[in-house]
Amino acid sequence: MRLYAIGDIHGQLTLLKEAHARIMRDGGQDALIVHVGDLIDRGPDSRGVVEYLLRGQRDGRPWVVTRGNHDRFLPNFLRDPHWIDPGLSAPEHWVDHPGLGADATLASYGVNSALPRDRLHAEALRAVPSAHAEFLSSLPLWFLHPLALVVHAGIRPGIDLQDQAELDLVWIRRGFLESEANHGPLIVHGHTAIGSATHYGNRLNVDGGAAYGRPLCAVVIEPGSVNLLTDDGREPLLPQKP
């Protein structure tokens, strides 16, 4: 039994293809790969990432993609140009927030984010394929596997999986990252960028910071072991304290 997971992608199509190549060298073409979300924003080719994963799933590849907080921005903007994500610490619009990366995502679709809001919305509706918006908005919030629970940000400790709130699943940090509780399955997540994939015993953070010019992490999880996949092969990830 084996499960592969890839961290936050953030528009890095080349890094995503390289991560898939590392996985396929390790586990073959039919390897089950789960992506922790945040497909878009900040990086240069959000459109390419969405199209690549969408086509892969349509072609029958065993690829699972969970929903990240950034994956909510574009489809909700298309639905309502005034929508502001309630998970943000300050109520600032996706397009106006300097750190969220809307400009890069819109540029990948050929849309200039400096346009006035009404015109920007109209241009985005024209440029973004409806299949892309539907794909992003329909991504599952979690994926449960015998080896792990994969979710974008984490879980609220002590709450049954079926009762978890979407805002926690895509946004949580405080209350989860510092928890040493036994959650049952190993929680595989991203959302909080660190230097490389790190195993904390009860959780595994696979967001190595590809959004900020660092590598896109790919890991393999097997009974009793977790390994980071590098160009030189496997690198064991041993549990450490948070």
Image: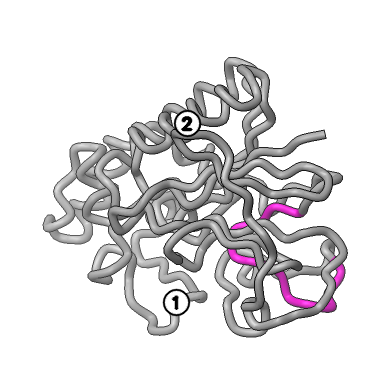
For the residues labelled 2 and 1, say whether their Cβ atoms are less than 8 Å apart.
no
Tell me: 214 left or right of 142.
Answer: left
Q: Which residue is mark 1?
A: 88
**Observer-nearest of 17 and 28:** 28
The residue range painted magenta reads 149-160
Which amino acid is tagged 1? Leu
Neighbourhood count class around disc 2 (C-alpha, 10 Å): few under 14, some 14–19, many 20 upward: few
What residue do we see at 84% from left, 78% from top?
158
- How far apart marks 2 and 1 lie (CA) works out to 26 Å
Q: Position of residue 241 (x, y in %)?
A: 66, 77
Give whichever of 118, 161 is nearer the camera.
161
Residue 138 appears in view: no
Are there few (<14), some (14-19), or many (20+) residues within 10 Å of tag 1? few
158 in the magenta segment: yes
| First in residue order: circle 2 vs circle 1 | 1
Q: How many marks?
A: 2
Q: Residue at x 77, y 59 (%)?
A: 186
Relative vertical location of residue 101 with respect to residue 147 in this rendering, above or below: below
Callout 2 secondary element: helix
Q: Quadrant of the N terminus?
A: top right
Magenta span contains residue 147: no
Q: For mark 2, what is the residue?
A: 131
| Residue displayed at 28% across by 68% down | 99
Residue sitting at 38 percent across and 48 percent down?
215
Q: Residue 191, image x and y in percent?
A: 51, 63
Q: Nearer the viewer, mark 2 or mark 1?
A: 1
Q: Secondary structure at mark 1?
A: loop
Which amino acid type is marked by label 2? Ala
Q: Nearer the viewer, residue 77 or 226?
A: 226
Q: Main secondary structure of the magenta part?
A: loop
